[in-house]
Image (cartoon, rainbow, N blue to C red):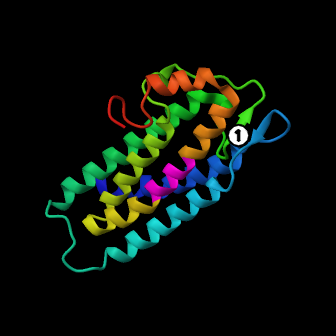
Amino acid sequence: MIERILLIVVMLFPVSEIALSLIKRSRGRAAKSEDRGSMRLLWLSICLGVVLATAAEWVPGTQLPVPLPTIRVAALALLVGGLVVRWTAILTLGRLFTVDVAIHSDHDVVEHGLYRYMRHPSYTGLLIAFVGLGLFFADWLSIVVLLVPIILGVLNRVVKEERALLESLGPAYAAYCARTRRFVPGLL
């Protein structure tokens, strides 16, 4: 049963991200795009990571030394937990959330919900979900080659996003950055 649910979540994960990228692009004069290619690079890093993880699964001797049912439960928990964090952050931002880095004409610093504790809960959730996807392969090498390009793509994106927000929101965003961590409260 867990295996079937996990497979469904693994298949719905990219579907939800593709739908999000089609629905939540910045449009019109209300938002100024500051993406600078970061969305394209992020998608490329995700595709590269998934291809490498799939290939690495066939390398002998890299399977995790944990019973497969335990791995599947952990993978499902991380995937679902990460997606809950991601979608909670997206819903908290509402119309300010776009898949491309964009600053709205009436953009303001959001400091409620998960944003009270971290600046990028949407990316935190995405990374947690990808750790779960990595566990789905039940292979340590797959986890590494999946996460490295994705983490680099997310970091590139965050730098561009924060630069745009600092330019647009100035001292209010700088003060928010001083009070919060990027991804994990109290740590990162």
Nearest the viewer among 130 and 183 is 183
For the point 30% across and 58% down, which residue is it? 135
Q: Position of residue 181 (x, y in %)?
A: 42, 31
Local crowd size for mark 1, using a 10 Å CA cut-off: few (<14), some (14–19), many (≥20):
many
Report whether 19 appears left or right of 66.
right
Q: Main secondary structure of the magenta part?
A: helix
Instruction: Give SS at disc 1.
Output: strand
Q: Position of residue 140 (x, y in %)?
A: 25, 65
For the point 52% across and 66% down, which residue is it? 47
Q: Position of residue 82 (x, y in %)?
A: 41, 42
Q: Does the image show residue 1?
A: no
Quadrant occupied by the C terminus: top left
Taking 148 as reference, is 58 above or below it? below
Q: Position of residue 127 (x, y in %)?
A: 42, 48
Q: Which residues are magenta?
A: 150-157
Residue of label 1: 102
Report whether 66 appears left or right of 158.
left
Q: Is residue 43 magenta?
A: no
For the point 56% across and 55% down, which residue is it? 15
The kind of residue tagged 1 is: Ala
